[in-house]
Amino acid sequence: MITLRGIEKSYSLGSNKLMVLKGLNMQIYTGEMVSIMGPSGSGKSTLLNILGMLDNYDSGEYMLDNVLIKDLSEKQAAQYRNKFLGFVFQSFNLLPFKSAVDNVALPLYYQKVGKKQRTKRAEALLEKAGLLEWRDHLPTEMSGGQKQRVAIARALVTEPKVVLADEPTGALDTKTSSEIIKIFKDVNASGVTIVIVTHDPEVAKATQRLIKLRDGIIEN
Ligand code: ADP
Ligand code: MG
């Protein structure tokens, strides 16, 4: 599903260059659920941003579902993101003044799906997340675990092939984290490929494979 070959990425810092990814090779197969761990500053978010087409890389090759993801225009990147990917973040990133159902339906709006259909699909996902009775509530009225379940429902509403999650349990307590892990496992069981950046050994344990990042390359 995902192939990275010789990926290099640096940031310029004044007249200096900070090399973050140093010729990274990686393969993630269709239907896998993998975790990525590594020390703070090792490039995990940089890597996830590249996988999510939120940032470009300097050299190498990134293939996603047999499509070469390179030098895309903003518009192309947005199209591929919409078609292939769902995102889950540590801080949920829900729109604060929108209800749960509107938050979940939002990605469909960008796909120009009609209002009725958007609502119907968003409700179906909220129901799956056990949150249908919360459909009209704002994020401020929900617990962290509920917000993350809304965020996962939003990530799934477009039926992505791959879900990318950056520290999805980083803001949650242990019990809530295990509920979130279970949801990811269920989603994965339905065939969706899942990539989770995490510091949490419990999350890593729940995945099929652990990829370790250190100093800009894969360790194992
Ligand atoms: P991690 O997620 O593993 O903690 P990051 O990918 O966020 O690591 O960052 C890797 C390195 O790149 C860090 O040294 C960080 O300071 C640097 N970095 C990240 N983003 C930028 C940026 N936009 N500009 C300059 N340096 C950056
Ligand atoms: Mg990070």
Image: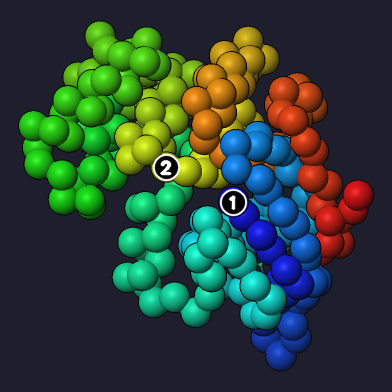
x 47%, y 43%: residue: 161
> In the visual, does 51 lie left or right of 21?
left
Q: Amino acid at mark 2?
A: Pro
Around disc 1, counting alpha carbons within 10 Å, would you say few (fewer than 14), some (14 to 19), or many (20 or more)? some
Q: Is residue 208 visible?
A: yes
Around disc 2, counting alpha carbons within 10 Å, would you say few (fewer than 14), some (14 to 19), or many (20 or more)? some
Which label was assigned to residue 10? none
Q: Secondary structure at mark 1?
A: loop
Q: Is residue 166 visible?
A: no
> In the visual, does 126 lie left or right of 167?
left
Residue that mark 2 sits on: 160
Q: Amino acid at mark 1?
A: Met
Q: Position of residue 54 (x, y in %)?
A: 49, 62
x 23%, y 43%: residue: 108
Q: Position of residue 177 (x, y in %)?
A: 62, 19
Q: Residue furthest bottom?
A: 15
How is the protein colored in the picture? rainbow
Residue that mark 1 sits on: 1
Disc with the residue nearer the chain's start (1 vs 2)? 1
> In the visual, does 182 lie left or right of 102?
right
Q: Secondary structure at mark 2?
A: loop
Q: Label 1 vs label 2: CA separation? A: 12 Å
- Residue closest to the eye, 158 or 46: 158
Q: Position of residue 102 (x, y in %)?
A: 21, 32
